[in-house]
Amino acid sequence: MILQNRTVTAFEGSRRIASGPLAMVALRATEVVARGETGPVLIFDDLTGEQVDADLRGLPESAAEVPAQPMPDDSAEVRGRGRPKLGVVAREVTLLPRHWEWLGEQRGGASAVLRKLVEQARKDSVAADTIRRGREALYRFITTIAGNEPGYEDAIRALFRGDASGFAGRIASWPPDVREHAQRLASGAFGEL
């Protein structure tokens, strides 16, 4: 997972210790680990809620010295079906015979019709997809860091019911930094709170 241009947040136990670019947050986390403070140090991707595996051993003295993550090498061009220069990738699609028959009758052929249908479906589902991704990110974060907090199960139920006020009520007694970060992630799960 490439985290360039994305922010992360680190927690030592239930205390937020840093938020920002991975290099800066990793440096701060290294300082906390070096001081031997209690509690595990966990780093979360702010967009996906996933825990980020960062090797904190032997990091440089300053964040400016932390090397940027390498970008994927696009120079090795793989030749295959489709139109690679246009970014077209051939993959298998399984449809019923009646679907193939209908696609064959359409102007422009099956591929053109499928592309139009996919584009329309993408446009129609933008809001729902954004909320779904927000809920998944929030779920990942609170499951990892707050799974033992009081009201956790009820908070999860409220999250997937789309009950923003119920969710906020269930996390009210959680540690302040965990609660605040969960509320920040909740803006993507419920829309703006």
Image: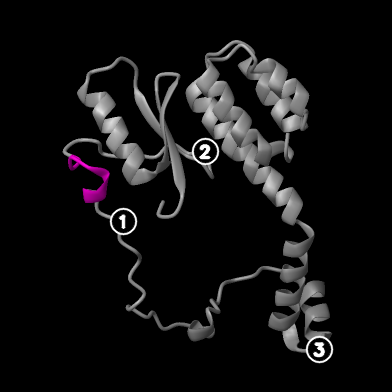
Mark 3 or 2: in front is 2
Between residues 150 and 88, which one lies in front from this camera angle? 150
Residue flagged by tag 3: what amino acid is it? Arg
Residue with the mark numbered 3: 107
Say if 98 sits above or below 151 in the image. Answer: below
Residue 22 visible in image: yes
Residue at image location 53% in from the left, 76% down from the top = 89
- How many residues crowd mark 1 within 10 Å: few (<14), some (14–19), many (20+)? few
Q: How many marks?
A: 3
Q: Amino acid at mark 2?
A: Gly
SS for dot 2: loop
Image quarter of the C terminus? top right
In the rendered structure, the answer to whether residue 14 lies left or right of residue 172 reads: left
Q: Which residue has dot 1 on it?
A: 69
Q: CA distance from mark 1 to mark 2?
A: 20 Å
Q: Mark 3 or mark 2: which comes first in sequence?
A: 2
Mark sitting on residue 49: 2
